[in-house]
Image (cartoon, rainbow, N blue to C red):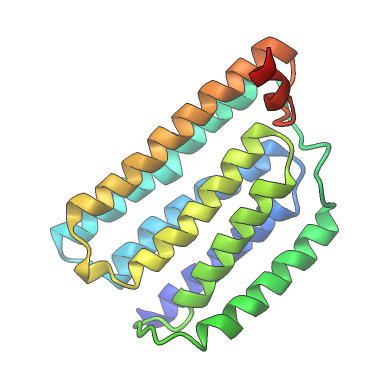
């Protein structure tokens, strides 16, 4: 199971880079959906696959992160009539290079932390996913892409939580998933408000929206 878990973690990193290197919002949303499914399967692999707790957590993760939230983001993309991220603060090649540096730094940092896990790659991939999510969040101008960045960041936190999966109560884990849903729902309302006022969903318009 350890090798399979490491394969899932490597695939999660690939979805991080898929978001970093793509200007198409549909591709970014597809990547975050795949990442949500991978997280659900990973939680089942790390925990006892035969336990009700593990199955419920995996099913909830796949349902919310892999299906519900991507569906909502696709709907927001269609309603806002936007298809691409055209004005990133940092170019896509530079973003990929920074992502690679983040992965290297994450492995260096993870080696210095006294965290014991059954899967060696879990902590460094968690760090890398968190940092890459933050990078997407602060370097993309479209609100929908920033929501994707927030979700990647939260997925990094989720991966950290898997290191203590056996100690985290079931209700707390479900609460984390619901918090993600609520946060994205609120940000979706902001997206539609910006689009209605400006015919654009650039987050830069938030300043003008606040002053109006």
x and y percentages locating residue 124 in the rendered image: 52, 76
x and y percentages locating residue 11 in the rendered image: 55, 65
Residue appearing at x 69%, y 48% in the figure:
138
Side of 32 where 48 appears, left or right = left
Q: Quadrant of residue 47?
A: bottom left
Q: Is residue 46 above or below residue 15?
A: below
Q: Residue furthest front?
A: 211
Side of 20 where 32 appears, left or right = left
- In this view, the residue in front, 58 or 137, is 137
Side of 125 where 159 appears, left or right = left
Residue appearing at x 81%, y 53% in the figure:
92
Residue 152 visible in the shown view: yes
Residue 30 visible in the shown view: no
x and y percentages locating residue 203 in the rendered image: 70, 31
Which quarter of the rendering shows the C terminus? top right
- In this view, the residue in front, 208 or 148, is 208
Q: Is residue 88 above or below residue 126?
A: above
Which quarter of the rendering shows the N terminus? bottom left
Q: Is residue 170 above or below residue 123?
A: above
x and y percentages locating residue 100 in the rendered image: 72, 71
Q: Residue furthest left?
A: 52
Residue appearing at x 66%, y 79% in the figure:
104
Instruction: Count the labels in the image.
Output: 0
């Amino acid at each position: 199971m350890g090798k399979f878990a490491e394969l899932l973690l490597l695939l999660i990193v690939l979805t991080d880079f898929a978001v970093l290197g793509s200007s198409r919002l549909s591709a970014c949303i597809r990547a975050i959906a795949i990442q949500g499914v991978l997280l659900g399967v990973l939680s089942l692999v790390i925990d006892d696959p035969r336990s009700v707790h593990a199955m419920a957590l995996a099913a909830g993760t796949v349902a919310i992160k892999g299906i519900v939230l991507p569906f909502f983001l696709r709907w927001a993309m269609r309603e806002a009539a936007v298809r691409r991220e055209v004005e990133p603060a940092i170019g896509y090649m530079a973003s990929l290079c920074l992502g690679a540096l983040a992965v290297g730094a994450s492995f260096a940092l993870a080696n210095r932390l006294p965290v014991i896990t059954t899967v060696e790659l879990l902590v460094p991939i968690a760090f890398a996913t968190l940092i890459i999510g933050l990078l997407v969040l602060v370097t993309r101008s479209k609100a929908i892409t920033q929501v994707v960045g927030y979700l990647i960041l939260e997925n990094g936190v989720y991966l950290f939580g898997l290191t203590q999966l056996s100690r985290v109560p079931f209700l707390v884990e479900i609460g984390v998933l619901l918090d993600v849903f609520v946060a994205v729902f609120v940000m979706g309302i902001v997206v539609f408000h910006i689009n209605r006022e400006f015919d654009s969903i650039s987050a830069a318009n938030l300043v003008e929206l606040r002053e109006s």
